[in-house]
Image (tube, grey):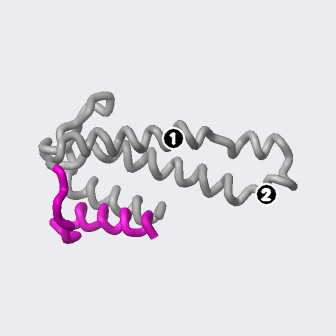
Amino acid sequence: LNAAVGMAYVQCEAEYAGTTVDPSTTPSLGDKGLGWLLPQLKEIQMRLLDVGSLVATPLRTSPSERLNRVSFDGVSEANKLERYIDAMDAQLPPLTVFILPGGGAPSASLHFARAVCRR
């Protein structure tokens, strides 16, 4: 999943190079480019690394300092992802049909990352 998100990041970055949006604001999906999505994708990649570290650290046999190093607030992180989703959904009309993946390399890469995540 992290590799798929990374591929989507690179595709969005290459396609929309030079597009900048203040990351502290909620972008409009109509904004030119997907540059606003790059910080969110990078954040998702970092949290996936955190999850991988936690999963790879045996709870019963690891020293407490190692367990402290790999711990994170999963509920808070899940809520952050939900806020990302809610902000994007609020700007879209309700979906009534399935969407064919495609629409360019960035879009196809994002669809692929979503499929990998759902799997």
Left or right: residue 14 compared with residue 41 = left
In-front residue for pair 19/64: 64
Q: Earlier in the sequence, mark 1 or mark 2?
A: 2
**Which element carries disc 2, helix, strand or loop?**
loop
Do labels 1 and 2 touch, CB within 8 Å? no
In-front residue for pair 110/93: 93
Image point (68%, 42%), residue name: 71
- Above or below — where is 1 with respect to 65? below
How many numbered circles are shown?
A: 2
Magenta highlight range: 94-119
Kindly give the residue lying farthest to the front in the view shown: 96
Q: Name the spot of residue 19 as percent of width and height, x first.
A: 19, 43
Q: Name the spot of residue 106 as percent of width and height, x first.
A: 24, 61
Disc number for residue 58:
2
Q: Name the spot of residue 42 as percent of width and height, x first.
A: 42, 48
Image point (44%, 63%), residue name: 117
Left or right: residue 2 compared with residue 24 = right
Query: Which residue has dot 1 on it?
Result: 77
The type of residue carrying mark 2 is: Pro
The type of residue carrying mark 1 is: Glu
Q: Name the spot of residue 1 as percent of width and height, x first.
A: 47, 64
Image point (25%, 67%), residue name: 108
Q: Dot 2, crowdedness within 10 Å: few (<14), some or many (≥20)?
A: few
